[in-house]
């Protein structure tokens, strides 16, 4: 019995390691997502675009960044930029609303027109696979998300180019320069 329990443990550990490796090695575009309306999607819908991936919240001191995110989106959308908002309730329970409440808040308070996705967790223990790819040990910029409004800039080729802290404004010179550089790359 002891030997079979050990064998089961070893098998379970191997399967867990394989699953983790598969998640870490998953191309960003292949991660399964749900949009804010609950429809299945992935980042494949944005292939060839430059992406600014942001974890967002409606009741955070940084929530006014929605205004700058929308302005950056409007300015660069025609050149191939997509701002993608991922609501997260992990930091101080600052995104407690339903999907409908989040959509209504974003559209009425900040006139958000960029795509929003279903609420997810950006850090363990229930970390969404998207953020496992963005922040895992093999990621370009590993490490946990510090707070709401952490930003990742992804190039047209699907590679993460930059990571910006939550306090870095979406229209800060370094963010704009990185976006413009990524948009020029073909």
Image: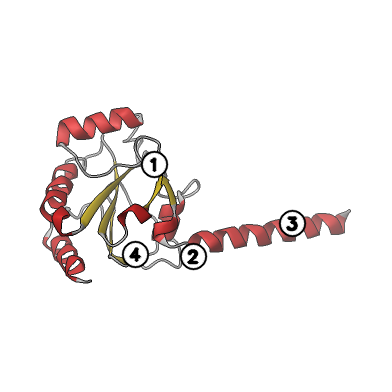
Q: Which mark is residue 25?
A: 2
Question: Seen in the image, is 89 located left or right of residue 110?
Answer: right
> Which mark sits nearer the N-terminus, 2 or 3?
3
**Number of callouts in the render?**
4
Looking at the image, which is closer to me, 158 or 47? Answer: 47
User: Residue 7: image x %, image y %?
Assistant: 79, 60
Q: Which mark is residue 65?
A: none
Q: Secondary structure at mark 2?
A: helix
Is any atom of residue 14 visible in this view? yes
Residue mark closest to the camera, 2 vs 3: 2
Q: State the residue position of label 4.
A: 158
User: Residue 2: image x %, image y %?
Assistant: 86, 56
Q: Which mark is residue 90?
A: 1
Is any atom of residue 145 visible in this view? no
Mark 4: few/some/many CA within 10 Å (<14, 14-19, 20+): some
Q: Quadrant of residue 100?
A: top left
Q: Residue at x 45, y 68 (%)?
A: 138
Q: Which mark is residue 9?
A: 3
Question: Seen in the image, is 15 located left or right of residue 154?
Answer: right
């Amino acid at each position: 019995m002891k030997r079979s329990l050990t064998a089961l443990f070893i098998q379970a550990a191997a399967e867990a390691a394989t699953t983790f490796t598969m998640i870490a090695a998953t191309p960003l575009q292949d991660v399964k997502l749900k949009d804010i309306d609950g429809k299945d999607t992935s980042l494949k819908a944005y292939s060839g675009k430059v992406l600014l991936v942001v974890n967002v919240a409606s009741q955070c001191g940084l929530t006014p960044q929605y205004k700058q995110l929308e302005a950056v989106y409007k300015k660069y959308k025609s050149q191939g930029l997509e701002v993608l908002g991922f609501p997260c309730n992990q930091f101080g329970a600052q995104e407690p609303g339903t999907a409908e409440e989040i959509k209504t808040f974003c559209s009425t308070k900040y006139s958000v027109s960029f795509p929003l996705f279903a609420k997810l967790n950006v850090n363990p223990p229930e970390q969404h696979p998207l953020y496992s790819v963005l922040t895992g040990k093999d990621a370009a910029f590993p490490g946990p998300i510090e707070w709401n409004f952490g930003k990742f800039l992804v190039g047209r080729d699907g590679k993460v180019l930059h990571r910006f802290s939550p306090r870095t404004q979406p229209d800060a010179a370094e963010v704009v320069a990185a976006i413009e550089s990524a948009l020029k790359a073909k």
